[in-house]
Amino acid sequence: MPCTVIVGGFWGDEGKGKIISYLALKDKVDFCVRTGSVNAAHTIWHQGKRYALHMVPGGFVNENCRLLIASGANVHVGQFLKEVEETNVKKRIGVDNQASIIEEKHSTQDKTNAHLKGIGTTGWGVGPAIEERVRRTARLARDVPELKPYLADVSAEINEGIKMKKTVLLEGTQGVFLSLFHGTYPYVTGRDTSASAVCSEVGVGPTSIDDVLLVLKSFMTRVGAGPLPGEITKEEAMKRGWFETASGTGRDRRAAPFSFELAKRSVMINGATEIALTKLDAIFPEVKGARNFEKLPEEAKQFVVKVEKETGIRVNLIGTGPDAFDVTDRRK
Ligand code: IMP
Ligand code: MG
């Protein structure tokens, strides 16, 4: 653990939020840093309540966890303030001075641009906001009076934490096949979503990372346009219990069976050292809520073993339900 990067292995919505909430509580994580932007929603069930977090790091469920938003991130001020209120984390959340700001005009540009419409963006305006940052005309967190009480030097705090042997989670967003560099271009998001990019957004060097935890869902989903190998129809997805809607935009998620080939590629690009396999209960309903690997049905175990064989990486965590503790933890 000490410093772990958590990233999505497919097209986002793999269940990173749930795995983060589990680790935050179970491993008593000291720091959780959010990267990316408001387009990504991380779903977390906490004390019977569902949260779809676009800004606040998933580690909020642990009351002792310091929460930070990286300098490479893109902050939506209204959404940030709303979630800070909702999760009651005012006293322990910080935003890097240099994080850029995403504004209403970016959302309008996103929604009215025919090319972006064809890609099926979330409409939050992340692409246009990043364009503006690259042009060096973006507003930064330090320019916003409402953010004054939260301003922090995130890379300094995190690197100091790592030095003090604190437990750190760097929270990636989306999945590697939505990466601007490694994904299915042009059907991608506006940034690199791989593990290295997460480190870069936070300001932590690759030599400080102990683990890269790759989150793979037991079947694949994608929202918006672009290729999805092995895609099944909506009717078929419903029949199999794989039909989902996006937690952020409410759109239908397209679905396909798990691809070992893509999982392998994802492990490669991210340099994964461990895998979290989520929603195993969606393909094997009998495993719902299971917390003990040995007690899983033989078929389910075989699927897990096949993921390990094909990727060469151990499946350390298995998601068996929406609650933070619906996990089979196979770590030593
Ligand atoms: P954008 O990130 O809003 O520009 O959208 C670009 C593509 O990434 C679209 O296909 C979106 O549906 C997809 N996308 C963006 N954020 C997420 C996410 O958090 N989960 C899943 N797909 C996403
Ligand atoms: Mg999501």
Image: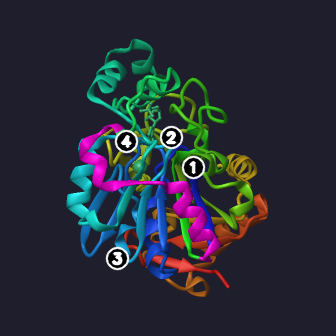
SS state under label 1: strand
Amino acid type, residue under disc 4 in the picture: Ala
Amino acid type, residue under disc 2 in the picture: Ile
Per the image, the residue denoted by label 2 is 232
**Residue 212 coordinates in the image, percent (x, y):** 66, 61
Per the image, the residue denoted by label 4 is 141
Picture residue at 68% right of the left edge, 49% below the top? 266
Q: Earlier in the sequence, mark 1 or mark 4?
A: 4
Foreground tag (3 vs 4): 4
Q: Is residue 230 magenta?
A: no
In front of the other: 225 or 274 = 274
- Whether residue 2 is visible to the viewer of this picture, yes or no, is yes
Magenta span covers which residues? 143-165
Mark 1 is surrounded, within 10 Å at the Cα level, by few (under 14), some (14 to 19) or many (20 or more) other residues, namely: some
Foreground tag (1 vs 4): 4
Numbered badge on residue 63: 3
Real-space CA distance between mark 1 and mark 4, rounded to the nearest whole angstrom: 41 Å
Q: Is mark 2 within 8 Å of ligand 1?
A: no
Splitting the image into 4 quarters, where does residue 206 fall? Answer: bottom right
Q: How many marks?
A: 4
SS state under label 2: loop
Numbered badge on residue 257: 1
SS state under label 4: helix
Q: CB of mark 2 within 8 Å of CB of mark 4?
A: no
Q: Is mark 3 within 8 Å of ligand 2?
A: no
Above or below residue 193? Residue 91 is below
